[in-house]
Image (spheres, rainbow, N blue to C red):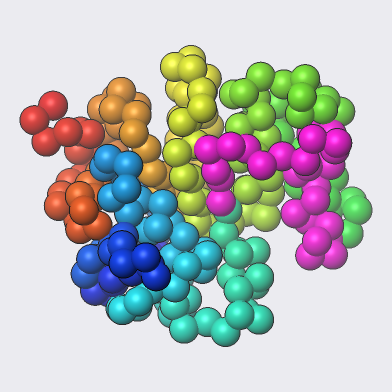
């Protein structure tokens, strides 16, 4: 599903966010990417949806070298991915239904298909009863579940989640992890960056740890910290 081949990413200010990273994620895996702030976690995800390009090395998604894609092909790549951010990124003047449907309208999906897909996505995240709500009337956890529904409404094979529980309280964070686990059980590959030690230690999925832009640990069913 995902492969990094000797990837280095440097920025114009001289910062090396990633250093010679080689990593493979197989279809259906759930992978936590952990490490302190500034170790390259978000950069790793940005390379997958081509918000950034590697300075050296190659990045593959579903067998496709995304690091070599021309700019005109990037929208097509992103339509096949789901991306969830820490800060929700919902349209405040649109209802829950409209926020999720937006991703389908952009690609010209027919109205009846849009309705059925949005309802299915809402059901999966446990908010089928709130299609007409406005984002400002929802809790933070509910808003994040809507952003997840929007990310999966196209049934992407790969879901990228960048600190999706970072702004949430412990109860809401756990609800989000239950949603992501259900999505993974349906066959979607999930790669999630996080600082949340409790979540990582409870779920015991594969853990990739970064330090100073390098992979320093890659452990199946790992804990957040080596000495935890």
| Any part of residue 22 in sight | no
Judge whether residue 104 is colored magenta.
yes
| Any part of residue 40 in sight | yes
Q: Position of residue 75 (x, y in %)?
A: 66, 70
Give the quadrant of the N terminus: bottom left
- Identify whether 150 is placed above or below 3: above
**Where is residue 55, by image quadrant?**
bottom left
- The residue positioned farthest toward the left in the image shown: 227
86 lies left or right of 132 = left
**Where is residue 45, by image quadrant?**
bottom left
The residue that appears at 88% across and 59% down in the rendered structure is 110
Give the quadrant of the C terminus: top left
The residue that appears at 34% across and 29% down in the rendered structure is 196
The residue that appears at 45% across and 39% down in the rendered structure is 163
**Magenta region, residue range:** 83-109
Q: Position of residue 80 (x, y in %)?
A: 60, 64
Q: Position of residue 125 (x, y in %)?
A: 62, 31
Please tell me how many numbered marks the rendered image carries: 0
25 lies left or right of 49 = left
Pick the residue in front: 7 or 80.
7
206 lies left or right of 53 = left
- Identify whether 43 is placed above or below 179: below
The residue that appears at 68% across and 49% down in the rendered structure is 153
**Where is residue 123, by image quadrant?**
top right
Q: Position of residue 184 (x, y in %)?
A: 46, 43
Judge whether residue 80 is colored magenta.
no
- The residue positioned farthest toward the right in the image shown: 111
């Amino acid at each position: 599903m995902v492969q990094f081949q000797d990837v280095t990413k440097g920025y114009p200010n001289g910062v090396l966010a990633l250093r010679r990273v080689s990593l493979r994620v197989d279809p259906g895996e759930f992978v936590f990417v952990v490490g302190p702030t500034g170790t390259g976690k978000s950069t790793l995800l940005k390379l997958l949806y081509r918000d950034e390009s590697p300075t050296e090395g190659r990045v593959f998604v579903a067998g496709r070298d995304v690091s070599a894609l021309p700019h005109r092909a990037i929208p097509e790549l992103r339509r096949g991915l789901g991306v969830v951010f820490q800060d929700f990124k919902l349209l405040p003047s649109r209802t829950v239904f409209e926020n999720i449907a937006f991703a389908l309208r952009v690609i010209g999906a027919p109205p009846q298909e849009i309705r059925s897909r949005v309802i299915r996505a809402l059901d999966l995240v446990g908010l089928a009863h709130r299609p007409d709500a406005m984002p400002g009337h929802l809790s933070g956890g509910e808003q994040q579940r809507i952003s997840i529904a929007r990310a999966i409404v196209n049934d992407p094979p790969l879901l990228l989640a960048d600190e999706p529980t970072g702004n949430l309280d412990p109860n809401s964070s756990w609800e989000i992890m239950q949603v992501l686990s259900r999505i993974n059980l349906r066959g979607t590959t999930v790669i999630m960056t996080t600082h949340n030690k409790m979540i990582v230690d409870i779920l015991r999925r594969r853990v990739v740890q970064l330090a100073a832009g390098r992979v320093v640990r890659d452990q199946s069913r790992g804990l957040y910290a080596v000495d935890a």
